[in-house]
Image: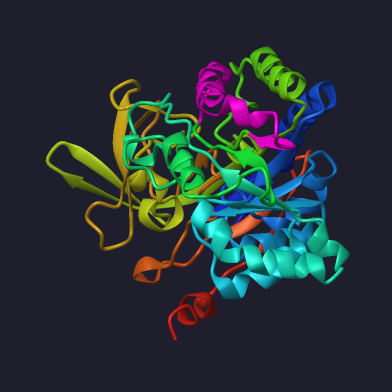
Amino acid sequence: MQINELKTPCYVIDEGKLIENLEILNGVMQRTGAKILLAQKAFSAYYEYPLIGKYLAGTTASGLYEARLAHEEMGKENHVFCPAFLPEEMDELLEICDHIVFNSVSQYLFHRERIAAGRRSGDDELAGVSIGLRINPECSTQEGHEIYDPCGAGSRLGVTRAALDKVIEEGFDLAASDIEGFHFHTLCEQNSDALAITLEAVEQKFGDLLYDIKWLNMGGGHHITRDDYDIATLEKCINYMKEKYDLEIYLEPGEAVALNAGYLVTTVLDIVENRDTKILILDTSAACHMPDVLEMPYRPPLKDSGEAGEKKYTYRLSSCTCLAGDVIGDYSFDREIQIGDRLTFCDMAIYSMVKNNTFNGMPLPDISVMEKDGSCKVIRRFGYEDFKCRLS
């Protein structure tokens, strides 16, 4: 089956492009000794985990379910971070994870007895879990979407040096604790120059403590597989921190793993006009099938199109939901669009499948895989029961 034969709407994972990305990431690992993990919050189509596991060191999770998925479907290094862990989750996380990163000293202290009990039990799996603390270097390097900035004023993510010093003054002994590594995540779709700036802040705020830990996780947001990404600077940053502080280095990109490795194919159901605006009604939805279009917001790339007014025919792309704001954007084409035409959105492997929903009873798109020869196969098809069983 070819992509133009798929029932729409349909997500299509491009395995050829996925492999290209994985080869780039594996090259960084080979040259630096750093370990790169898949951040499942961006891409968790576990059909591809055996492939990804051939190239990367493992996965990172944002909670119990992602950690369990990685344990079951990839079986390599399994890391987890969450702003707060539930007590009833900790037993399983200690059994299936290699690294558990806490967002605060108080969270670590809350769960410390469970960690210690596991190690006293002689359980080799529990004894091997490495505990980390997320730090906040208070260094913002992004503009335009400050609400998503982990280093923004009032951020709940990570321990600032002032907060860490306060608990140390109150009696917390970092050196005597189980904490073996630091984690920071401050970037979003950025180049390695932003990492270099961030590392200066990390050293300024936490440098005296780096000599006493075993590993440093530099988080995600590194757009390593983007065409203009400066890999040489990334590798210089990794080697510098690794050699100066004798640290094992981790990176956990999500987008870079599946960047530009997926599509969302849709069909034009109707064309309506309002004054001078021609509006395409599609069988896909921004609100349901690519929610970041409304949340971030951003304009998803569309094959064979241009900006509004750039080409001869301009249309507003919208959906068949009842939400007036369910608008994908304005695009232009070299030809007039007809009812029944198929359109292909690009870069739809990341943060689309993992965030979609069934608002308005919209069916979830099928998920297909396109192999390197261009042939496609459907790996998941959703129906009425997937909608019905969510809420009762």
Q: Is residue 392 one of those drawn in magenta?
A: no
State the extent of the magenta-drawn residues as a range.
Answer: 189-217
Q: Residue at x 39, y 72 (%)?
A: 361
In this view of the protein, which residue sits in the foreground, 16 or 80? 80
Residue 181 lies, with reference to residue 223, above or below; the image says: below
Image location of residue 28, percent across then percent down: 76, 25
Specify the color scheme: rainbow
Image location of residue 126, percent across then percent down: 79, 63
Q: Is residue 202 one of those drawn in magenta?
A: yes
Q: Residue at x 52, y 58 (%)?
A: 107
Which image quarter: residue 98? bottom right
Q: Does the rendering let one see residue 144?
A: yes
Image location of residue 298, percent across then percent down: 37, 37
Q: Residue at x 43, y 81 (%)?
A: 391
**Residue lying farthest left?**
275
Q: Does the rendering let one see residue 159?
A: no
Residue 307 lies, with reference to residue 382, above or below; the image says: above
Q: Quadrant of the C terminus?
A: bottom left
In this view of the protein, which residue sits in the foreground, 377 or 48? 48
